[in-house]
Image (cartoon, helix red, strand yellow):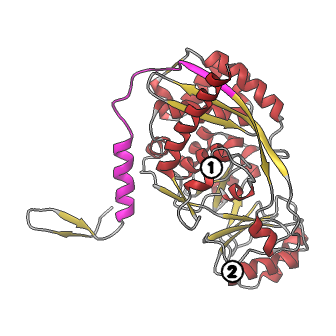
Amino acid sequence: AALDATVLPGGHALLDEAPDEIAAAVHGFLSYHHADEEDVVITAAVVEDFSVATRKPRENAWAGTSSETDAGAVEGAWIALASASQYSIGEAAPCRGVHSESAADARAALRRCAAKLEHATIPPAVKQLDGSLNRFLHDVCGADAELPSVRFALETAVIGLVTRSPSALYASALGRGARGSVDIAALVDGEDDAPAFLPNRVVKLKAGVLAPERDAARVRDAVKKHYKVRVDANRRWSREQYETFLAHLGDAPLDFVEEPPFSSSNIPAALDETLAEADWSPAFDDAEVLVAKPALIGLERTLALARRHGRVVASSCFEAGAGLAHVAALGAALSDDAQGLGTYAWLAEDPFAFEELLDDDGAAFDVGAGEEALRAFAHRVFERRHHDH
C-alpha cells in the first residue's frame, strides 16, 4: 500500500498516515523470532482445577429491570507447561449449553493429556498454525485433544511455549501485524438496557428474552447513547418475531445481527453457532461477519476461517480471566474490530485479574501486558504445585 510520508533531507520519511498499523507491523516482526526453528521440549505439565464465581455486572443491574445478580460459577482447569526457557498456560472452561463436555470431563481429559505431554517434543511446524498444531496434539494426546474446551487449553498452552508473543505469531500466520490493544464489546443481558456510561464504543445486546418490540426499543435506546450495536438472540427468534423486530427498529443502524432467521438487505448478518456445525459452506461467504468462539471451534480453526473471510470476530464462551486473555491475543490478529470479551464483567472473582490489564477506562485490553501476565500466571501454578507437595 502507498503511504503518505514527509520526506526529510537524507531520504528519511515521516509517516503521516497509519502510524498505528506500521507500529503493529514492526512490533509483530520484531517479536516473532524467525530464528527459533529448534524443537521445544516440554519439561513439565501440571493441571490445576478452578471454580470462579460469576454474577451479573453491577452496571447492568443498575440499568435494567432485574437488579438481582445471577450468582453462578465458571468451572474448569488450567494446564501449565514448562520448557527450559519459559512457562505457558491454557484454560479449559466448558460452558453449559455451548460445550457438550462437563467441567469434570475436561479436568480428567487435561490430566491424561498432561501426563502424555510431559517430555514431549513440540515440532517447529506447529508455528505454521495450518493444522500442524492439532496434528501434534492428536498424535500425543489422542481423542482427549478433540474435546473443544480441552483443545483450546492445549492449543494455547503449546503456542505459549514456542513464542513470547502468541498474538504476533497468529498475525504472522495471517500475513499481518498484531494490534497492541484490543477493543472490547460490552455485553448487555437480554432484559437490560445498555447503561449510558460504559466506556466501550460497541455493545452486544442479548435479545429474544423480551418481546421483539421491546428488543427493538433497547437497540434504539443504545444507538441514542452513541453505541455501535450488535444483536444476538441466540437463535431464539422465529421469522415472524424477527420481522416484528425489524419493523420496530426504524432506521437505527446495526453493526450486525447474529444468526438472523433470514437475511435482510440493510442488516449485516453474522454467523456464530453455524460455525460449529460445518467446516465451510457458501453461507460463510455470504455472512458479513463470522463470530468465532475459539474455545468451541478451536484456535487453529479460527485462524483458518480468518484466512478465508475478511471479518472474523473472536468471542468468549464465559471463560475465566486466563482464557479471556488468550481470546484477546487471538483477537489482536483478527480484523480491527471490538472483540467479544465483555463477559469479563460477569466474573465476581478472577485469580488471573483480567480487568487489571484493561486500559484506564476499561474499553480495551493491553495485549503485550496480557501475554506477560499469562506467563507469570503459569509460573504461579507451578509454584503452588511445589508449595503443596
Residue 308 in sight in this render: no
Find the residue positioned furthest to the left: 10
Of 206 and 287, the residue lying toward us: 206
Whether residue 211 sits left or right of residue 131 in the image: it is: right
Residue 301: x, y in percent?
62, 40
Q: Quadrant of the C terminus?
A: top right
Q: Is residue 331 above or below residue 118?
A: below
Residue 98: x, y in percent?
81, 45
Asked which secondary structure carries label 1, the reply is loop
Residue 174: x, y in percent?
47, 46
Q: Quadrant of the N terminus?
A: bottom left
Image quadrant where residue 239 sits: bottom right
Q: Is residue 188 above or below residue 88?
A: below
Whether residue 108 sits left or right of residue 357 in the image: it is: right
* Label 2, residues with CA under 10 Å away: few <14, some 14-19, many ≥20: some
Image quadrant where residue 279 sits: top right
Q: Which mark is residue 223?
A: 2
Residue 26 in sight in this render: yes
Which of label 2 and label 1 is nearer to you?
Answer: 1
Work out whether mark 2 precedes mark 1 in sequence or the reverse, and give the earlier one: 2
Q: Is residue 28 magenta?
A: yes
Asked which secondary structure carries label 2, the reply is helix
Of 220 and 290, the residue lying toward us: 220
Whether residue 120 sits left or right of residue 5 in the image: it is: right
Q: Amino acid at mark 2?
A: Val
Asked whether the residues under the numbered discs 2 and 1 touch, taking CB atoms below 8 Å apart as contact, a structural biologist would say no
> Measuring 19% from the left and 64% from the top, which residue is drawn there?
13
Q: Which residues are magenta?
A: 19-47
Q: Disc 1 marks which residue?
A: 353
Q: Amino acid at mark 1?
A: Ala
> Measuring 71% from the left and 26% from the top, which residue is drawn there?
110
* Label 1, residues with CA under 10 Å away: few <14, some 14-19, many ≥20: some
